[in-house]
């Protein structure tokens, strides 16, 4: 379980295909604290550390993960949002995030405001996921508050700290991102359909 509060930005140093899997090697400031078999969210995707190197760790994304997320679009040199799993005795600064991406979205608008940034994302509503204004959404692993909500889109406003310390500073119109919708909202929606 995660909180959606990004610990650090890592940098992809190697990508290796292995049958239907993709091995992703990342250099980061938290690598020395990781251990093999530990869960780490990469752009919101919970992946297991399978190897440790000199300042790097490697994780594997299987075909199911590659089909449902944007993790397969990563390129060498690209920044990736990293968060280690939550400690049960810690504050929950973001919201409950499982690291299980529900679907992807496309950035359809990006506006630089006076001291903040607003992003609008469009997603396939046929999947059944919803957002609500002032509710929580996880974009590339970042816990954010929904500003505007529609049947197949939402917007978020980003403070300078989040813009500078996550890979949102690379997101522009046309960029694909990972979405994890609020788990409580998903359970309520499922109960309402029964």
Image (cartoon, rainbow, N blue to C red):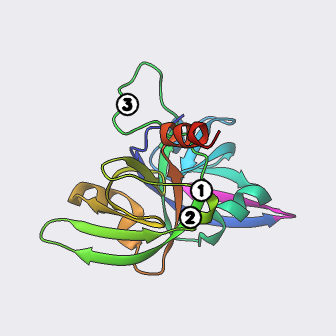
- List x then y, in percent, for residue 49: 66, 43
Which portion, as a residue range, is magenta?
18-27
In the picture of the structure, the residue carrying the numbered disc 3 is 92
Tell me whether circle 1 and circle 2 mark residues in contact (CB < 8 Å).
yes
- List x then y, in percent, for residue 129: 55, 54
36 shown above or below 102: above
Query: Residue most toward the right?
Result: 19
In the image, which disc is placed on residue 181? none
In the picture of the structure, the residue carrying the numbered disc 2 is 125
Question: Which of the two residues, 154 or 128, is positioned nearer the viewer here?
Answer: 128
Q: Secondary structure at mark 3?
A: loop
Tell me whether circle 2 and circle 3 mark residues in contact (CB < 8 Å).
no
Question: Which of the two residues, 22 or 1, is positioned nearer the viewer here?
Answer: 1
Question: Which of the two residues, 79 or 126, is positioned nearer the viewer here?
Answer: 126
Mark closest to the chain's N terminus, 3 or 1: 3
In the picture of the structure, the residue carrying the numbered disc 1 is 128
Q: Secondary structure at mark 1?
A: loop
Q: Quadrant of residue 110?
A: bottom left
């Amino acid at each position: 379980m995660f909180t959606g509060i990004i610990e650090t930005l890592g940098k992809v140093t190697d990508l290796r295909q292995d049958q239907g899997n993709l091995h992703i090697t990342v250099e980061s400031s938290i690598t020395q604290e990781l251990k093999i078999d530990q869960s780490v969210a990469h752009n919101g995707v919970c992946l297991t550390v399978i190897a440790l190197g000199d300042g790097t760790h490697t994780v594997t994304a299987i075909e199911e993960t590659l089909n449902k997320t944007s993790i397969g679009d990563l390129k060498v040199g690209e920044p990736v949002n990293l968060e280690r799993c939550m400690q049960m005795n810690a504050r929950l600064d973001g919201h409950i995030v499982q690291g299980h991406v529900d679907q992807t979205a496309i950035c359809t608008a990006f506006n630089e405001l006076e001291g903040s940034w607003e992003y609008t994302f469009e997603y396939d509503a046929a999947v059944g996921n919803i957002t609500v204004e002032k509710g929580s959404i996880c974009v590339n692993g970042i816990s954010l508050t929904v500003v505007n909500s529609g049947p197949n889109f939402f917007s978020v406003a980003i403070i300078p700290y989040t813009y500078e310390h996550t890979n949102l500073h690379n997101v522009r119109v046309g960029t694909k991102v990972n979405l994890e919708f609020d788990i409580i909202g998903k359970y309520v929606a499922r109960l309402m359909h029964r």
